Structure formats: structure tokens, C-alpha cells
Image (spheres, rainbow, N blue to C red):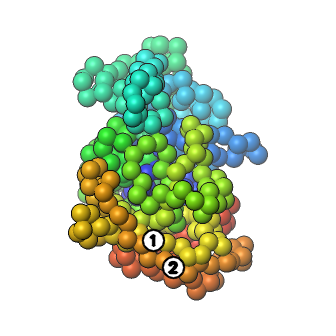
Amino acid sequence: MSNIILVDLMYGDSGKGRYVDYISQWAHTVVRTGGGANAGHTIIVDGKKIVLHLIPSGVLRSGVTCVLADGMVIDPEVLVQEIEMLGFSPIKLMISPHAHVVFPYHKELDASRENAVKNPIGTTKRGIGPCYESKAARSGVRIENYLDTPLGEKLRPFVRDTSRYLWNATRADKNILFEGAQGTFLDIDHGTYPYVTSSSTVAGGACTGSGLGPTCMDGVVGITKAYTTRVGNGPLPTELFDEVGEQIRKVGKEYGATTGRDRRVGWLDAAALRVACRLNGVDSLAITKLDVLNGINPIKVCIGYKVNGEHRDEMPLNLNELELAIPNYVGLAGFNCDFSKVKERRDLPAEARNYLSFIEGELYIPIEFISLGPDRNEAIGGNPF
Ligand code: IMP
């Protein structure tokens, strides 16, 4: 395999950065194909904590080329700041001329709309929706038409035909990772509309957003935390409002990297993951933050829903149905584990292995990566390329 799409199966913040850092040791190029500065990941550079919003997490490994592809909406102020902070050269970063520019008025419009309504979407106020509106209305400005401005001049050396670059890299059998942004249920077509973002966040978006055809893709890794989180408004049927939820939020440090908001926390939702796996054509799973569930007993998993007395094995996406949907939980034995001693899956206690096998059994997809802590070495997995 050489071209892999990584996609968040839920509402974003699944720890993609963690997985991308791990997989980037084998990657030649890491690509972002949609969204913009609404994403956020924290990295440590020379002992300093930095939050990046546009440059993909693959930046953590030297020798990896980062691409901001056609489907993105780019805030030049944020991008120039990130490039200058990291001291990037044009060998390391490429920007598509077709990506759209987020202007200050897009951000103002986003914020004023959110502030004006009783039931806001809970956006990041980064101008994402209004910029994609300009694009769809065919009145937007692309990066290629922005290069004569003071900020545009700083971006000019990085701009090149990224679709062609990716095609050539594919022909040369280089390993390319398409780093999805946000999450499956924030997708403009397939998410919990209208509580979604304005771009295509499912695996198919990697093709439209990069200019590579579907036959160029070799595999889809679906990533989720061992529990569920969501920032912003919209349905989260397995949400926890008790001390277990509070414990998971604290231990998992579930606070938004872009907005600092508390993330809402809930049990793992296999009925939602089932939908996500088929929407994305997932063929392998990555589970993050298993360690955060340490000491919680029992651990519940939603395996289906009751809607108007009828059993559903998939989470309904119609908001009216979702409001009425009652999760059907299975309680699994919790685990107490010194994760520092775990090097392989078989080193995990039986209860933790059972939790993972249960997820695999519900989804019929193997788990091929497990993260057990924030450090680079606290993970189990092989080379997925
Ligand atoms: P927007 O993308 O700023 O328009 O926000 C729309 C919805 O997507 C809101 O619920 C945001 O909280 C959510 N969202 C956008 N980007 C991210 C992300 O990177 N992680 C998690 N949620 C996100």
C-alpha cells in the first residue's frame, strides 16, 4: 500500500496528530485536503508547546513533505504565522493555488451569525462556513489570485501544482498519508446536519480535495478514541453528565485546541462507528487514549438504538429520530493497568483486550493501532503502508 487515507470516525479530536506522528516515520508526504484553521493540534518543538491549525501533523517528522491541497480554505494570517514560527522552507511545504482564501470578513460573518441566533452551530468562528459559501457561489478568491498582496508574497514560494506533485509521487510509489480533518459526523453531506462543518470530511473528500482519483487510494484507516467526544452543539446521544464523564474529561484533557472549550464526553458508540465505517470504507481501525479509561468500571458501549420502539443497529442521522433515540448499552468489565509496561497487545490485561476485541466484533474490522499515552513510544502498531 502506498496511499492511505486517515479519517476520524466521530466528531473530530480523535488524536489524529498522535497517529500521524507515528505513521509519518514511513511517510514521504502528508496531505490535508479540506477544512482550514478550524482544526487544531498541539505539538512540541524544541520543548515549546505550539498549536498548529493549518500545517498537517506530519510536520513533526523531518523529511516529510506537507501539502495543503485544493479543497482547503486557508487563512493567510494564520498560515504565514505558522510558517514563520516553524522556519519552513518551500521544500517542506506546498500549497495548492486552488485553495480558497479566508478573509477577515468571513470570520466576522461567522462570529456575528453565531452570536445572533438562539441555537448556534457552535462553530470555531474561523470563517470556514462563509468562505466555503463564497467558493460555492463562485465569488471566492483562490490562493493563485492572492499572491500580489503583502501576505500573498510570503506564500508565493510555497505555491505549486499539488495535484500533479501528488500524482508523480504516487507513480513513484511514495508513501502518502491523507490526513483527514474534523470528523465523519461533521461532514457537510453525511454528518448531523446542520451541526456540521462546511466541507467533506469523509474519505471520499481526500480525492476531491487533492485532485487524485479513487483508484490512487490503497486503504482507509478509521480513527476513534476509546470513548467519544464532541465540541460545539449537536447530538451526542451517549453523552455523560456524571462524575465518570468529568473523570474522562480531566484525565483525557478534553479541552478544544482551537477554542479552549470543554469537550463533551460520552461512551463509545459502536452504532455510530458502524455508520462511519461504511461511509468511509474503513479497512483498519486505530484506537487512541485507551489509557484514559483506566480504572473505570464498568465501561459501557452503545451497540444500537431504540427509535419509536424499533431496534436500529446504526445511529440514525435524522435529527428528529436522533432526539428520540435511546441508546442500548452493553457493560464491559473495566481494567486497571500499568500501561508503561505494555509493549504489545498481548501485554494488556484480559479486560482491556476484551474491550478491543468487542469493538472489532461489532465492526468486523481489525484494530491495527492502539495508543496508550501521549508519548511517541506509548503505542502499539506496525507499518500500515
Ligand atoms: P466550523 O468548522 O468552525 O464551521 O464549526 C462547525 C462544527 O464543527 C462545530 O461544532 C465545531 O466545533 C466543529 N469543528 C470544526 N473543526 C473541528 C475540529 O478540528 N475538531 C473538532 N470539531 C471541529
Which residue is nearer to you in this view: 240 or 226?
240
Q: Nearer the viewer, residue 12 or 179?
A: 12
In the image shown, does 14 or 23 lie closer to the viewer? 14
Query: Percent from the top left, x then y, of residue 188?
Result: 30, 43
Label 2 crowd (10 A; few <14 / some 14-19 / many >=20): some
Helix, strand or loop at mark 1: strand
Quarter location, residue 329: bottom left
Residue at 64 percent across and 53 percent down: it is 253
Q: Position of residue 125 (x, y in %)?
A: 47, 30
Q: Residue at x 40, y 58 (%)?
A: 237
Label annotation for residue 362: none
The answer to whether residue 178 is seen in the rendering is no
Q: 165 above or below 371?
A: above
| Mark with earlier residue (2, 1) | 1
Quadrant of the image for the C terminus?
A: bottom left
Q: Position of residue 222 (x, y in %)?
A: 41, 62
**Disc 2 element:** strand
Q: Residue at x 26, y 45 (%)?
A: 189
The residue under the point 59% across, 75% down is: 297
Near-viewer residue (296 or 200): 296
Residue position for label 1: 301
Q: Amino acid at mark 1?
A: Val
Tell me the kind of residue under disc 2.
Answer: Leu
Q: Which residue is mark 2?
A: 332
Q: Quadrant of the N terminus?
A: bottom left
Residue 119 position within the rendered picture, expressed as x and y whole percent measured from the top left:
39, 34
Q: Is mark 2 within 8 Å of ligand 1?
A: no
Q: In the figure, is residue 342 to the left or right of 228?
A: right
The reply to whether callout 2 and callout 1 are in contact (CB within 8 Å) is yes
Q: Quadrant of residue 378?
A: bottom right
